[in-house]
Amino acid sequence: MKKLLYQLDTDPQASVFDNVVAYDGGADHVTAFADCHEEMITPLVEGAIFTRSGTNKKNTALFVGGSNIAAGDKLFYAIQNNFFDSFRVSIMLDSNGCNTTAAAAVASILKSGDISGKNAVILAGTGPVGGRAAVIMAKLGAYVTISSRGMERSQQACDYLNDRFGVEIKPQEAKTNKNRAELVENAHIVLATGAAGVTLLEEDNWKDNPNIEILVDANAVPPVGIKGIKMTDKGESRHGKVTWGSVGFGPLKIALQRKCIGRLFEQNDLVLDVDEIFSMAREMV
Amino acid sequence: MKKLLYQLDTDPQASVFDNVVAYDGGADHVTAFADCHEEMITPLVEGAIFTRSGTNKKNTALFVGGSNIAAGDKLFYAIQNNFFDSFRVSIMLDSNGCNTTAAAAVASILKSGDISGKNAVILAGTGPVGGRAAVIMAKLGAYVTISSRGMERSQQACDYLNDRFGVEIKPQEAKTNKNRAELVENAHIVLATGAAGVTLLEEDNWKDNPNIEILVDANAVPPVGIKGIKMTDKGESRHGKVTWGSVGFGPLKIALQRKCIGRLFEQNDLVLDVDEIFSMAREMV
Amino acid sequence: MKKLLYQLDTDPQASVFDNVVAYDGGADHVTAFADCHEEMITPLVEGAIFTRSGTNKKNTALFVGGSNIAAGDKLFYAIQNNFFDSFRVSIMLDSNGCNTTAAAAVASILKSGDISGKNAVILAGTGPVGGRAAVIMAKLGAYVTISSRGMERSQQACDYLNDRFGVEIKPQEAKTNKNRAELVENAHIVLATGAAGVTLLEEDNWKDNPNIEILVDANAVPPVGIKGIKMTDKGESRHGKVTWGSVGFGPLKIALQRKCIGRLFEQNDLVLDVDEIFSMAREMV
């Protein structure tokens, strides 16, 4: 019986990234739906849960993706609300790669040791990846701040995360590289999750900072957001700090996303969100 | 050469149910198109009939689905109007599972014996499944009535079916459970095809009725529409009547739909609509 | 690792023709996107180039199709603008089958010998197939004219082709069969690429013409555009001229399109447009 993955994407076009990785993770067929939202989900879920019986049910699974994590979160819960008794299939949430990218980034950070009690700043961190990385680090005992160009946006992101995950992430406005340099003054860990093509820190903003131990830049398209780091950095030592670029921890992210897909087909009631995915990442490092 | 099924759905999103079953029925790849309508069908059909030659043509097939059977009917004929000479592929109509569900329900009813001359009432029967079940039973010689909350809707449904299939199905208005209890007073067979969550008959409305021999409830999502029947009923005896629930005849419905898909790829000119699909169901019981 | 083809179609519905041929050409999975345009292409391309590494990258490829070649051309370049360094995958342009159909038609014409210095008229030639055939023949040294019912449309088509490909194709208005008969008076080669059901030349318009050596009708749906030719003509001799119908050179067109798809997966940096595709056609004749 074929392993069928339904890729439910909240964007107007379904992610090709997720599609390719789903095949590489072991799905026999991936069928993508774009523009997915709560109201349309019932017949879709019924199609997944009513068509195969008994142990065959584990061969159908659902993946929620798209660039908007709030929309993805909603969809993820709406789907689960349609499950009942044994009528359920495994499901994974990874809007914009948020869980797998964040898990891979933090698992890479942990290679340098425990982060409990450390200060972590996530620059341009209001997006899905920044948010999930913040949650993971906060749960590991770090003091996490999310910066954004506007206070309102940062506050909203933190409120959402603190409310949903029961953590205490602090918002911070930082409009300029100078603002950001001040913000990371007492940070031990700096993670940049900004948009392509935007410089968030110059090399001078961090190279002489005595507190910073680790810098990670999640940007996958050159140029990087933190100058002085290379995309290929994989735990490099630069100015006495450990540096990671997206190409450095990218293979872990992709291997993790593939592994998650594979797991979906091992049982019919797996729910993969940030905690489960980060656990898997730690096992893989 | 791969068996390619094109799933042409008249709804804004293609049915996952049909998609899964198509894979399980033997299609190597299922490509779904949503929002299908007559005007867009020509290039689509040309793509199906011009790309493979000779005996390879049987490896391409078309499936028409979606919740609207009138739209499905139109599309089904429009597609066939684009076929010519040997430039044709096999095609199946099963909007909302109407043909396979109705065929499986009636084939289950027939396990208790011939229905010629019997009175059959289809409660909330104006939808695709109710309509197809009505046609099948009428062709088997039963006197069939379709009820609906409004007379106009019931009349329209019957006119459409009588006109298209040359049968004589009678419309009936039945707004309340009491109305429906009166309506089934002289019925031998009662089939409920209403929407999820709507009660059509209380147990008291049928348990002491001396005429009713068989009750079938096609509702796949609890609660059932006829109280006193269980979804898992599979020819149970309740109050001296034979009862069937959707989980009881569901495996036949799914096995039938899979078998239909498999048949599509055995030749390049099969047309599967209600008659052919019901014939297959009878062979399987 | 599975060979994944992303079929990017500029039309509101993706071509089933291209979809089937892509499977037959060796793609393990074809995922179609409709309504593709420049603005949406970046995340899509990133999904293709970032998900597989090293020699595995050649297992992902992109195909641009749709009925509008100008839109296809734009998309084709926009995609390539997102490639950098080794982050690229193979890509093919074949809007409306323009390159493969034109290449197969001209390769068939060449079976009768060199066309350098010959006069070639493409009737109703402003579409994708007519345009690409014009370019191929012009590059082979023929004097090519494209006719259309309106001068403006013909002029636009020629301007576009001459500008993009550095050729010198001449526009011509020809509203009636009589106009077209006059237009082909001095032609050695006549190719018809009009819409289904439109007669472009009567048999009397060409049968006694002493100059015409070859007539090709690319219309795949009967009736043909040039009366006196049959769709099945495969280098037939009629009234002393060599004639080709769509069914005659169709197998070459389809074999060529399949072969192109296969080639995409042999390396990760192949770019298949008119020149490369015509070269492949010549090898196959």
Image (spheres, coloured by chain):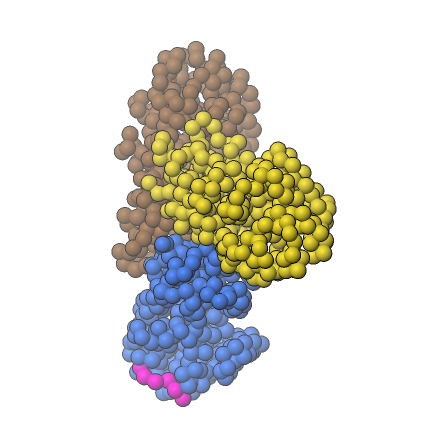
Chain colours: A blue, B yellow, C brown
Residue toward you, A185 or B20: B20
Residue B129 against residue A191 in the figure, above or below: above
Residue C26, given in percent of the width and then of the height, sits at: 32, 44
Q: Is residue B2 magenta?
A: no
Residue B27 sits above or below residue A161 on the image: above
- The residue positioned 36% from the left and 54% from the top of the image is A1
Give the overall secondary structure of the magenta segment.
Answer: loop
Q: Position of residue B159 (x, y in %)?
A: 67, 38
| Closest to the observer, A152 or A84 | A84
Q: Residue furthest bottom?
A: A117
Magenta range:
A112-118
Q: Is residue C35 visible?
A: no
The residue that appears at 41% across and 64% down in the rendered structure is: A268
Q: Is residue C126 above or below residue C87?
A: above
Q: Quadrant of the N terminus of chain B?
A: top left
Horizontal arrangement in the rendering, residue C166 relative to residue B228 (left or right): left
Q: Residue A23 location, x and y as percent?
A: 36, 57
Residue A63 drawn above or below residue A207:
above
Whole-percent x and y of residue A139?
A: 43, 82
Where is residue B116, by image quadrant? top right
Please name the residue shown 49% across and 19% down the image.
C201
Q: Is residue B26 visible?
A: yes
